[in-house]
Image (cartoon, rainbow, N blue to C red):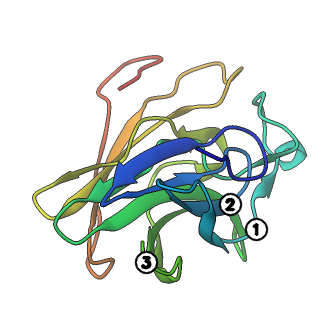
Amino acid sequence: MARAPGPASWPVYHLGAAHGAEPSTTRWYGLDLATGAVRWHTNAGTPVRARSLPRGDITPAVGFTGTPGVHTSTGTPYAVAEVESAHGVAHELVAVDVATGGIRFAEQVDPAGMNAADRLPWGAENLSGGRVVVMFGGLYGVCGTFGAWVVAAPASGHAPILSARAPTAGRGGI
């Protein structure tokens, strides 16, 4: 299979196609499994410049860090991108039309009380009960007390998010 340009992406396979979010960017590619040809590509926003973060070892920019997930009954792939926003660092859940690469929606998923600048989505996005579940952990080198977060955002992109912080007295992960 031919690869999309750039560093290795985390592919998700569904309905005879592969799609993947390119790490350290906000670029997303859809590939034809039979030919390896790029069927579409899209950009999910402006990735955060690594030098603007308090710590970490992803350079020169941070965009997608977790593995995309897919809603198998609708064919909608999801991924969370770390992007620059009017208020600084934000994490957006992005849903893409798997046939065209068009962005169906992009919704911020940072829960109240979480410092977005020192958290990244590390796990694979999963679907449960009509919600996309996202796991956030700390940046490399974050010291002191921090806790991991779990966020459940609606797969439709149009409802409040649910969130929980790992109940740890110090460092914690999911």
Q: Are marks 2 and 1 in contact (CB under 8 Å)?
A: yes
Query: From the image, which quarter does the C terminus lie in?
Result: top left
| Measured Cα–Cα span from mark 3 to mark 2 | 18 Å
Mark 3 or 2, closer to the camera: 3
Instruction: Report x, y in % for residue 61.
Output: 81, 48
Q: Amino acid at mark 1?
A: Thr
**Between 102 and 79, the one nearer to me in the picture:** 102
The dot on residue 99 is 3
Q: Is residue 111 visible?
A: no
**Between 78 and 5, the one nearer to me in the picture:** 5
The dot on residue 85 is none
Disc with the residue nearer the chain's start (1 vs 3): 1
Disc with the residue nearer the chain's start (2 vs 1): 2
> Which image quadrant is residue 72 in?
bottom left
Task: Identify the residue position indicated by label 2 in the image.
Answer: 26
Q: Amino acid at mark 3?
A: Ala
Q: Is residue 26 visible?
A: yes
> Which image quadrant is residue 129 in?
bottom left
Instruction: Report x, y in % for residue 59.
Output: 84, 38
| Measured Cα–Cα span from mark 2 to mark 1 | 7 Å
Task: Identify the residue position indicated by label 1 in the image.
Answer: 46
Q: Are marks 3 and 2 in contact (CB under 8 Å)?
A: no
Question: How busy is the neighbourhood of tag 3: few (under 14 within 10 Å), some, or many (20 plus)?
Answer: few
| Measured Cα–Cα span from mark 1 to mark 3 | 23 Å
Instruction: Report x, y in % for residue 173.
Output: 40, 23
Q: Residue at x 38, y 18 (%)?
A: 169
